[in-house]
Image: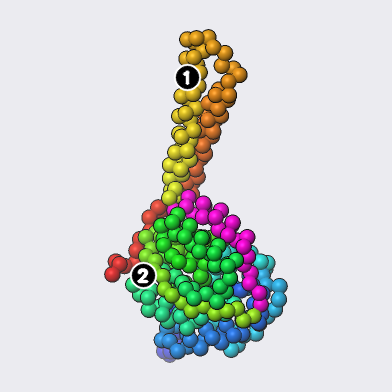
Amino acid sequence: MPTVKKTPVKAANKPKKIDVSVIVPLYNEEDSVPHLLKRVAEVMRQQKWTWELVCVDDGSKDSTAKVLEAARKDYPELSPVYFRRNYGQTAAMQAGFDHAKGDVMVTMDGDLQNDPKDIPRLMERIKDVDVVSGWRKDRKDNTLMRTIPSRIANKLISSVTGVDLHDYGCSLKAYRREVVENVRLYGELHRFIPALVSQYGATVEEMVVTHHAREHGVSKYGISRTFRVILDLLAVKFFLKYLHRPMHAFGMFGLACLTPGVLICLYLTMLKLLTGADIGARPLLMMGVMFILIGVQLLGMGILGELLVRIYHEPLGRKQYILRNKPRS
């Protein structure tokens, strides 16, 4: 009986391990993209890490997408992501995190104001912490209309969140994958990522980085973002302190309104019963009733919030805690 020669089966190719993912949101940066790709590649190819460059085109109206696609043959490390329309920097940042495969994720702007030469320094510092945040100490866009609102916003954010940073607006940051993958970004929360990851016990450090003047295009930022930062800060404060116990937030204010309302109405009731005084036209009665109604509504919102928290966690088995991959050194 003839023997059948067995052909060895080749092992399936394992996906290449990526050490560093550089994530760059882009919007109308067609002139900056070629210089950006060249500068990042020059720095990263000198290092010993495996790396990728995830460029997220945020629905650019110029030829940014075409420039990225054409550059893929010269930069095999490039992994572009294209949005159908403009969703904003936060959505672009989240898309970058979703598509990145690196153990460390480095974010930076695509306008050439961040220097890729700072990436090795970020990688050196992140060996001991979970997040390294850049600080543009010597800013090249040093105008009063930008620096004064920025300083006020940074002080306010640091005070409210408890994560003290000089420059929340700097996009050049490095994150360990294990802390970023627990965060979902919405609205314009990208600038609050260090504060958001702190709720999972992440350690955050700040490092002075180089800042260059814009070479091409125009800035996408204006004074109006200062007001949006304040609104987003209220949401972040709620997420950090009351995400898993909304009744403590709404209930506290509810009781603060309900208690004086009940006391006022009890006082007026006793006054009516004991003295027969006319209380129907008193402003104090309206105030007491208003406080009771507001208090009941806030308590009801707290109960609804508690129900939503349970609906969020229980069906999918989500936990309120996050495990660390290894003990902190």
Question: Residue 132: image x %, image y %?
Answer: 42, 71
Q: Give the main secondary structure of the magenta stretch.
A: helix
As rendered, which of 20 and 311 lies closer to the eye? 20
Q: Amino acid at mark 1?
A: Tyr
As rendered, which of 235 and 104 lies closer to the eye? 235
Which residue is painted at 63% across and 72% down in the image?
Answer: 219
The kind of secondary structure element at disc 2 is: loop
Magenta segment: 217-240
Question: Residue 88: image x %, image y %?
Answer: 62, 65
Res 101 seen here: no
Earlier sequence position, callout 1 versus callout 2: 2
The mark closer to the camera, 1 or 2, is: 1
Residue 291 appears left or right of 84: left
Which residue is painted at 53% across and 9% down in the image?
Answer: 276
Say which quadrant the C terminus sits in: bottom left
Image color mode: rainbow
The kind of secondary structure element at disc 1 is: helix
Residue 61 appears left or right of 234: right
Is residue 71 depicted above or below 179 in this figure?
A: below
| Residue 267, disc | 1
